[in-house]
Image: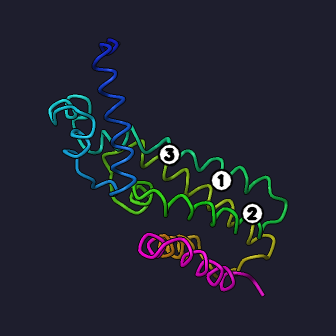
Amino acid sequence: MTKPLRRDAARNREKLLHEAARVFTEQGLDGSLEEIARRSGVSIGTLYNHFPTRDALIDALIPPRVAALDEVAARAAAEPDAWTAFTGFAGDLLDRLTTDRGLLDAFTGDHPAAAQLVAACHQGMSQLSSVLDRAREAGAIRSDASDEDVVHLLWALSLLGEATGTIAWRRCLGLVLDGLRAH
């Protein structure tokens, strides 16, 4: 049984999570822990009292953001047309990955000690696989396009978006989707 945090400790924890969200969104999951503490108005020791490792902080912060992709998957599942479901899923996912560097790092980085993050990423991959399986069964997507191929393409587009902005990845997404569509 854990005892509840004192009010000031709980307030510090919330400030740390808020500022970590901002820093990770801006800089990725390798963002400065010192910067997070500074923006929170606490010492680095206070940060480590709440989150003894970077992965502990990541596990407290990122899985709910990954779980937010459940909405994207639900929209795709509700869409009657398998191709529209896939393209909508891909576009929504890229919107999120290109605006949240921490989320992009969560999907592409290696944080094995962040067990909740790993589980959330597996859930996200399972959702993508379901959308792709449905598109394959409907004959909407090329049968030789593996889940891994699609993940690599989406990852590359997210990096393009991070480097050049929304207009570039959206244009290139259209080209990629044309290449993935069954003819």
In the figure, is residue 88 to the left or right of 163? right
Q: Which residue is mark 1?
A: 72
Instruction: Give whichever of discs 1 and 3 has the lower sequence position.
Output: 3
Q: Which residue is mark 3?
A: 65
User: Which disc number belongs to residue 85?
Assistant: 2
Decide: marks 3, 2 in contact (CB < 8 A)? no
Q: Residues within 10 Å of mark 3 (few under 14, many from 20)?
A: some
Q: Indicate the amino acid at tag 2.
A: Ala
Q: Nearer the viewer, residue 138 or 104?
A: 104
Q: Nearer the viewer, residue 98 or 113?
A: 98
Secondary structure at numbered mark 2: helix
CA–CA distance in space, label 1 to label 2: 10 Å
CA–CA distance in space, label 1 to label 3: 12 Å
Secondary structure at numbered mark 3: helix
Give the vertical position of 92 relative to 135 (above or below). above
Residue 98 at what x, y percent from top left? 49, 64
Magenta region: 159-183
